Amino acid sequence: METMGTEFINAFLHSNRKMRRSMLMLLLCFLLFSPFPLVFSERCHPQDKKALLQLKKDLGNPYIITSWNAKEDCCDWYCCVECDEKTNRVISIGISSSIPDANASGQIPPSVGDLPYLESITFHKLPNLVGPIQPTIAKLAKLKSLFITYTNISGPIPAFLGQLKNLELIKLSFNNLSGPIPSTLSQLPNLGSLQLDRNKLTGPIPSSFGAFKKPGPDLILSHNQLSGPIPASLGNLNPDRVDLSRNKLEGDASMLFSSKKTTQILDLSRNKFEFDLSHLTFPKQSLIWLDLNHNNIYGNIPVALTTVKYLQQFNVSYNPRLSGKIPQGGELQRFDKYAYFHTKLCGSPLPPCK
């Protein structure tokens, strides 16, 4: 093979232009149809590959990332890694299992911070992933998505996340995180969704959250132990979804209601909110979910609710100070009596008013 290549080069150098063209065509055909494999350089950057292999080792070499083989190009591993098409740098790692994978164990490896072009991190359904959110993540200036769910990571949500200005999604649901929500998160100009539900978070919703760049991120903070009043400045925002349910929040939440908003889901259920519902207005075109059950809301159900066109879920039960006749019309009568249970309301679907 080597002798044939040398002879071809010598002949090429000593041939005329027409013969060279013919020889180039012959070479092209040989390359296309040769039974001998061509050797190309590896796309994967060596620094990225080193970091990924260390990450695999630190997680206990779990089955889910078996394809992370040192002898193969990391950009070609069939699972859990994505490389940029132009730079070939690793931009995404997603270690996710459809069922809880107990093989991946330990803390989030520090080597995750050695992937400087990383834009997305996902750890999902890894019950033996423990310890804090890895501090080296603070080095990932290009990070857009931090998705860690259904694990047993614990400790506080780190304030350094507020330094990662490209973050668009923070989803840290179904973990064992504790402590307060850091106020620095409001410094993220591109954040579209903040999902911290089903943890053990305590303290108030930071007053700085009213300073989020409008319209503000979706706020999914349910199933925690948050307490105290919510900041009045939240009324300045217009997120699609607000879920503060199953906490210990109290006081006024009326600032979250307005016909000028485009809110789709508003769930304040199972808290200690106390405000007058009577004169509030609602997004007529966008609101599909309104759940206020198990609070201390008072007054009447406003007629304005009959103008909400696409309401699919509605519940004001277990607000014992809520009274008066249920307005007729719109979508309010499509909900059964349990949506109005344990109040002083009357009228369809409850018994007639006396």
Image: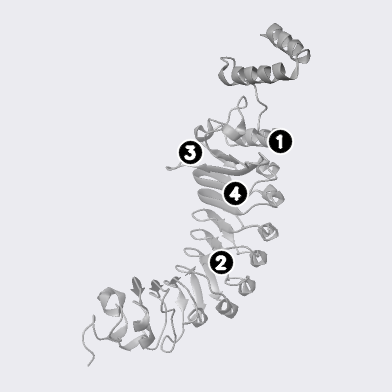
> Residue 306's mark?
none
Answer above or below: position of 319 versus 142: below
Q: Which residue is mark 3?
A: 102
Q: CA distance from mark 1 to mark 4?
A: 18 Å
Q: Give the mark nearer the N terminus: 2 vs 4.
A: 4
Pick whichever, 47 or 246, lies toward us. 47
**How dense is the environment of label 1, judged by Cα within 10 Å: few (below 14), some, or many (20 and up)?**
few
Report the residue at 54% width, 71% height from top.
227
**Disc 4 marks which amino acid?**
Ser
Residue occupied by mark 2 = 217
Q: Earlier in the sequence, mark 3 or mark 2?
A: 3
Q: Which residue is mark 4?
A: 120
The quarter of the picture where the N terminus appears is top right
Residue 218: image x %, image y %?
Answer: 52, 66
| Residue where numbered disc 1 is placed | 47
- The answer to whether marks 2 and 1 mark residues whose Cβ atoms lie closer than 8 Å is no
